[in-house]
Image (spheres, rainbow, N blue to C red):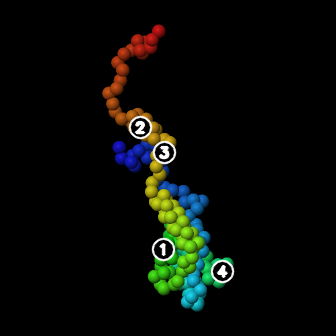
Amino acid sequence: MRRETAYKLAGRRHDHPVVGAGIDKQREIRFKKLPPGQVEHALRALSMLKGLQVERGNSEYALIVHYSVLDYSLESLEDALREAGFALDNTLYSKLVRALVYFCEETQRHNLESPERLLKQSNEVYVQAWDHHVHGDHDETPPDLREYK
């Protein structure tokens, strides 16, 4: 039995409810102090991207970005900034936070793109498939002889 058939028989839907699924992210991108003026240049460059909102952070060397995880990821944004020549903060704290955020966003994107799995209703698939299947299992014994009296 194909997986799609099993999903349909179990009553599962393939579309994911993206409303309220936590796909809108707010992240901080930190820059090094040198070279000077790179934060303003990065602010202008990132503000040109569609679906991405950029604002100044709490620090003078930080930017806050707002995006949907379906459109962007922090890893892709930071990789693009590095390729453009920007120097990002490389302290141990930033590296740890960055690695955790990369992993979480990659996992969330993978889960959103994959179909739902059959977990608790897997037996319903076989029950419904048996009901729809033409089979020859029919007891020819009369009902009054089937029961023990």
Q: State the residue position of label 3.
A: 119
Question: Which percent across, then down, holds residue 11?
Answer: 48, 45
- The amino acid marked with disc number 3 is Leu
Which callout, 4 or 3, points at the residue further toward the start of the chain? 4
| SS label for mark 3 | loop
Q: Nearer the viewer, residue 69 or 14?
A: 69
Badge 4 vs badge 2, beta-carbon distance below 8 Å: no
N-term-proximal mark, 1 vs 3: 1
N-terminal-most mark, 1 or 2? 1
The residues bearing labels 1 and 3 have C-alpha atoms spaced at a distance of: 33 Å
User: What residue is disc 4 on?
Assistant: 59
Mark 4 Cα shell of 10 Å, populated few (<14), some (14-19), many (≥20): few
Kindly identify the amino acid type of the residue bearing the numbered disc 1: Ser
Q: Which residue is mark 2?
A: 126
Which tag is nearer the camera, tag 3 or tag 2?
3
Horizontal side of residue 9 vs 136, given as left or right: right
Camera-nearest residue between 131 and 118 = 118
Of circles 4 and 2, the one toward us is 4
Residue at the image point whose x is 54% and y is 57% from the top: 17
Outermost residue toward the top?
A: 149
Q: Residue at x 52, y 68 (%)?
A: 99
**Few, some or many C-alpha atoms within 10 Å of disc 1 (few <14, some 14-19, many ≥20)?**
few
Mark 3 Cα within 10 Å, few/some/many (few <14, many 20+)?
few
Rounded to the nearest angstrom, the CA distance separating label 4 from label 2 is 59 Å
Reading the chain from its start, which is encountered first: label 3 or label 2? 3
Dividing the picture into quarters, in which one does residue 83 lie?
Answer: bottom left
Kind of residue at disc 4: Ser
> Can the viewer see residue 44?
no
